[in-house]
Image (cartoon, coloured by chain):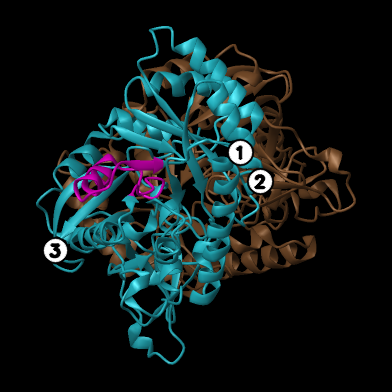
Chain colours: A brown, B cyan
C-alpha cells in the first residue's frame, strides 16, 4: 500500500541507499547491524546442532524472507509464523517450509491454508475439536486433486501460560481425532510465552521444568493410546537453554535471538555455558534530534516507530534516558548523575535499542541493513518486512 | 510492500469485500462505523463554524485521503500531519492543503519539502534558528523556478508540555528571522499533547488557560515588533472546547474526534454545551475467538493489531475484560461480577474499542468501512491507510 503510494522521490531515495554511508539513512528508520545479526544466527544454529535439536526459528519476530533464508542456510529446518497471512507472504517470497504455530478457526482462512499446503511444506497447530473438524472440512474440500499435498497438524498444550492449548491430559483426545480423520499428527506444540520474559534465570528454569513435565504427561497419554508422536516443538529466546537440556523437546522455535532487545537484555543470564550462548543487540531505530530545549532533546521517534509494550527503548551508548514523547517524539534527558553535556544537539543522530523487537519490526516497511557498525558503516541492503501487517 | 507481496487469494478477498456483510471481514481487521464517523465529522465542523474558527483536523490520526476529503467537504480548510512523508502520501492521494505541524531538520527532507510546496499548499512548523536557516537554504536551492510556490512557516511555542517549541518570549526572535529571510511567517503553533488526556475537565481547562496565556505572551512580543501574526493554530480532541472559548486560537487541529477511543472516552466531559459536542466511538478492531478455555477465551488480536500505549482495548458491549495476551492474542475474561456465560464461544466475533486510535491505525494497511452498524451492517468501502508507516 505504502510502496505504491510513496512519492517518486522517496522511492528513489530508498533504492539509492545501498552502498551509502549509514549517515544517509533517513530517520526514523529500522536498522540491522548485520555483523551482529549473523553472529547471533550462527550461535543459535551451533547450539541446536550441538544438542541434537532441530531449529525452526520464529519468523513472527522478523517477518522477512531474507532473514528466514539466512536462518535456513545456517541450518534451520524452516520457520514458524503465527498467522496464515504471514505464511502466505513468506511463501510468496520463496520460503518453502512453514509452520503456523497457532490456531486457525475461520473457514475462509482454512480454505486458504489448504491452498497454501499445495505450494509449501506446511503445518498448523490445533487445540480444539471444532478446530480439527473445520480443518478436516477444508482439507476434504480442497484436496480434490487426489491429495498429493500433506499437512502436519500439531496439538497445542498449555504448558503454564494459560493462553492457548489444551490441558496435557486432553492432548491424546485431539491426537486421536486427527489420526481418525486421516490427517497427519505431527506432534505437540508446547510454548510458554510469558516465561521468556521472567527476569530471574531460576524462575525461567522452573517454568521450563514445568513445561517439560506437561510435555511428558501429554506424551504418556498419546503413546499409551498407541499413537506415535513425531516431534515436540517449542521454546523461545528466554527459555531455549533450559528447554534444550530438559529432554522434552525435539525442536526449538526461538525468534528474538536474531535481534535481541532491551527487554531480553534485562533478563538475568543463567550461569553455565550449557544454558546457551549470548546474543548481541542487532536491531536499532535510528532517530534524529529535531528539537532541543535547555534541559532536554526531542527525537523524531515515538510510539509509531518502536513498540513500548515492554517499556521504552534504551538510548544506545549514551548517558541518556528516553521519556515518553507520544506517538511521534521521544524526549531525551541526561541519566541521573550524568552531565547536561550528555544531551545531543539539534540534528544529531541518536540510536535506540527497542524495548521489544517483534512489534517494533511490525511498524516498519523495510530494514536498512548495515555492515561495519552503526557509526561509519555502509548500507549493504534494504530488505522489505515482507509480512508487515499480516495480522489475519 | 504488503499489497505487492500479498497472495492473489488475499487480494481477491479484499477487493470482493465491498457490498458484503460485516461477517465477511477477516480478523483481526480495522473497521470504521461510517455512520458514527460521519456524525463526528459534522459535529466538529458545526462547532468550529459556530465559533468562527477554522478547522484543520489532524490527519496523523487517520492517515487517510478518503477521510481527509470528507473532513474538507464538511468544512475543514485542509489537514495537519506530523511527518513530511505523511504529507507526501496524502498529496499523492489528492489532498491539496497540508500543514506539517512539526519540525523538519534533515537537509534531504527539507529539499523534498520544498519540492512538495510546488505541488500543494504547504506549511511547516519551526522552533529553532538552525531549523529556519536550513529551511531557507533548501528554499533558495529549490526555488530556482522563480519562486511561484509559497510556504507558510509557523513558530511553535511550548504551551506547557515541555516537548517541542520555544518559550513564548522567544517566538518573536524566530518570527523576525523568518521575515528577514523573506519566508512567509504564518503564525503560531501552540499544541499541548499531554493536556488532551488529563482525566478531569477542570484540569484540562486549567492547562488550556495556561496555553492561551502563553499564546498571548508570544503574540504581544511579535506584534510589538511590528510583525503581523496571521493565525494561531492548535488544540486537540481533549481541549478544543476550552481552546475555542479562550479567544487565543484562530484554528483548531483535533484529530481523534473522528474515531474516538477508550482513552478519550475515559476523559471526564466538561459541564455545559459551550465546551463542545460529544463524539461517538467509530473505530473498532474486529477479532475472533480462536481458543477457548474453561474460564477464558482467546481472540486473534494482540499488540500487533491495536496499540496499548494508552492501555488495553475495551471489549465492546460485552461483560468482558481484555487481558494482555502478547503480540498476537488477547485473553478475555468475564468482568468482575459477570457470569461465566459472558464468555464467547470458539469462532465468535468480538469487537474491540482500541485504547488509542492513532497508533492503532498505523498498524493496519486498510479500513473496512461499514454502514448500518457493526452487527448486520454492510461493507461500503475498503480504504487504504495511505500514510501508514510514513514515519520520516
In-front residue for pair B88/A273: B88
User: Which is nearer the N-term, disc 1 or disc 3?
Assistant: 1
Q: Residue at x 74, y 62 (%)?
A: A205
Contact between marks 1 and 2 (CB within 8 A): the answer is yes
- Identity of the residue drawn at 21% across and 53% down: B369
Q: Which residue is mark 3?
A: B377
Residue furthest left in the image: B19
Left or right: A263 with respect to B116?
Answer: right
Q: Is B63 inside the magenta-drawn segment?
A: yes
On screen, residue A290 versus residue A269, left or right, reads: left
Q: Decide if residue A224 is in sight here.
A: yes
Q: Residues within 10 Å of mark 3 (few under 14, many from 20)?
A: some
Where residue B109 appears, as percent x and y from the top left, is 51, 23
Q: Earlier in the sequence, mark 2 or mark 3?
A: 2
Report if the CB atoms under discs 2 and 3 are less than 8 Å apart: no
Residues flagged by tags 1 and 3 on a common chain: yes
Q: Position of residue B273 (x, y in %)?
A: 32, 75
Image: A7 above or below B262: above
Range of residues picked out in magenta: B55-80
- Mark nearest the camera among 2 and 3 is 2
* Residue A66 falls inside the magenta stretch: no
State which chain disc 1 sits on.
B
Q: Quadrant of the N terminus of chain A?
A: top left
Q: Going 9% across and 51% down the picture, which residue do you hit?
A: B19
> How far, Cα to Cα, is label 2 from label 3?
54 Å
Dot 3: element: loop
From the viewer's side, name the closer residue of A321 and A34: A321
For label 2, the residue is B169
Q: Position of residue B62 (x, y in %)?
A: 35, 48
Return the residue at label 1: B172
Amino acid at each position: 500500500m505504502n510502496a505504491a503510494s510513496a512519492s517518486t522521490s522517496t522511492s528513489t531515495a530508498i533504492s539509492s541507499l545501498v552502498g551509502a554511508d549509514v549517515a544517509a539513512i533517513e530517520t526514523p528508520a529500522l536498522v540491522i547491524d548485520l555483523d551482529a545479526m549473523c553472529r547471533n544466527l550462527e550461535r543459535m544454529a551451533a547450539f541446536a546442532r550441538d544438542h541434537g535439536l532441530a531449529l525452526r526459528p520464529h519468523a513472527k519476530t522478523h517477518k522477512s524472507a531474507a532473514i528466514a533464508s539466512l536462518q535456513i542456510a545456517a541450518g534451520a529446518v524452516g520457520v514458524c509464523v503465527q498467522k496464515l497471512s504471514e505464511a502466505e507472504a513468506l511463501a510468496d517470497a520463496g520460503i518453502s517450509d512453514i509452520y503456523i504455530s497457532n490456531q486457525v478457526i475461520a473457514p475462509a482462512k482454512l480454505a486458504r491454508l489448504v491452498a497454501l499446503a499445495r505450494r509449501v511444506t506446511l503445518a498448523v497447530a490445533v487445540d480444539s475439536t471444532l478446530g480439527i473438524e473445520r480443518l478436516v472440512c477444508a482439507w476434504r474440500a480442497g484436496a480434490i486433486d487426489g491429495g498429493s499435498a500433506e499437512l502436519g497438524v500439531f496439538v497445542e498444550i498449555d504448558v503454564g501460560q494459560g493462553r492457548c492449548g489444551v490441558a496435557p491430559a486432553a492432548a491424546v483426545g485431539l491426537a486421536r481425532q486427527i489420526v481418525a480423520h486421516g490427517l497427519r499428527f505431527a506432534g505437540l506444540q508446547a510454548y510458554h510465552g510469558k516465561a521468556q520474559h521472567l527476569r530471574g534465570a531460576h524462575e525461567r528454569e522452573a517454568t521450563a521444568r514445568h513445561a517439560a513435565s506437561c510435555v511428558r504427561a501429554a506424551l504418556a497419554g498419546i503413546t499409551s493410546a498407541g499413537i506415535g508422536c513425531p516431534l515436540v516443538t517449542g521454546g523461545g529466546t528466554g527459555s531455549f537453554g533450559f528447554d534444550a537440556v530438559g529432554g522434552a523437546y525435539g525442536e526449538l522455535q526461538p525468534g528474538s535471538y536474531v535481534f535481541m532487545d532491551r527487554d531480553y537484555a534485562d533478563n538475568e543470564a543463567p550461569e553455565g555455558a550449557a544454558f546457551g550462548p549470548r546474543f548481541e543487540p542487532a536491531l536499532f531505530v535510528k532517530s534524529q534530534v529535531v528539537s532541543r530545549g535547555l534541559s532536554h532533546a526531542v527525537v523524531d521517534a515515538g510510539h509509531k516507530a518502536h513498540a513500548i509494550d515492554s517499556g521504552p527503548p534504551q538510548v544506545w551508548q549514551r548517558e541518556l534516558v528516553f521519556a515518553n514523547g507520544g506517538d511521534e517524539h521521544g524526549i531525551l534527558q541526561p541519566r541521573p548523575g550524568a552531565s547536561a553535556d550528555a544531551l545531543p544537539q539539534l540534528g544529531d543522530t541518536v540510536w535506540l535499542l527497542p524495548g521489544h523487537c517483534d512489534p517494533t519490526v511490525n511498524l516498519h516497511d523495510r530494514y536498512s541493513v548495515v555492515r561495519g557498525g552503526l557509526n561509519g558503516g555502509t548500507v549493504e541492503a534494504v530488505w522489505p518486512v515482507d509480512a508487515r501487517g499480516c495480522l489475519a
